[in-house]
Image: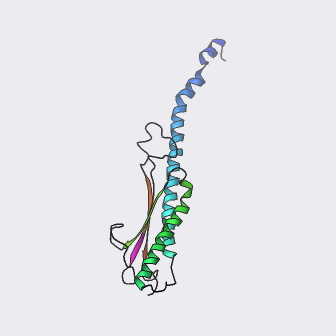
Amino acid sequence: MCTGGAMKHQRGATAVELALVFPVFFIFFYGCLMYGLIFLMRMGIQHAAEDGARAALSNQVITYTAGQTAVQHRQAQMLQRIQAAIQTASARASWMSHWHALNINAYICPVNVACPGSPMPDCNSTTPCQVVVTVSYPYATSPVLPTLPGFGLLAPSSLSGQARVLLDGRALPIT
């Protein structure tokens, strides 16, 4: 049984314990929240790039314009595929764009050639090409949560996703 003197020595012990334990739990909670949001954004960016690449693969121009050669028709189709890829990737990642504008690029280049180092190729059934879609977000300049001291060293400077699809004879119009 406690006497009145023992109760006086326990006064304020809970406040001291809370003051010692709270910062540890807060840092743990903040770290989980911050990295969970970074992971969510990274997966959203990758999903947007993959959907953009799929849109470029499935988008086809079927009709010719009068006086258009086969090469011009394929070039017009490639430009339309790039536009479809960028529009689809932008739509899928639009929930992130209110923090900062996303960088979305789409390129069509020959297989085994660095993109975007080459001009748009003439893709046909004998010369397969690839569509490369990249989506990036500058996380260092626009973090979703304010960065606590020390956490900025662990956060990424940018988040990016990339997807590639092959445009071979099955995905190109017969000319």
Residue at figure coordinates x 40%, y 73% from the top left = 130
Q: Main secondary structure of the magenta part?
A: loop
**Is 155 on the left or on the right of 90, as rendered?**
left
The image position of residue 126, as x and y in percent, is: 37, 84
Placement of 122 over or under 147, stated as above or below: below
The image position of residue 34, as x and y in percent, is: 51, 45
Q: Which residues are magenta?
A: 120-131
Q: Quadrant of residue 159?
A: bottom left
Of residues 37 and 104, the one drawn nearer to the viewer in this rendering: 104
Residue at figure coordinates x 36%, y 66% from the top left = 116
Q: Is residue 124 magenta?
A: yes
Residue at figure coordinates x 39%, y 76% from the top left = 129
Q: Residue furthest front?
A: 67
Placement of 136 over or under 152, stated as above or below: below
The image position of residue 162, as x and y in percent, is: 43, 63
Of residues 4 and 50, the one drawn nearer to the viewer in this rendering: 50
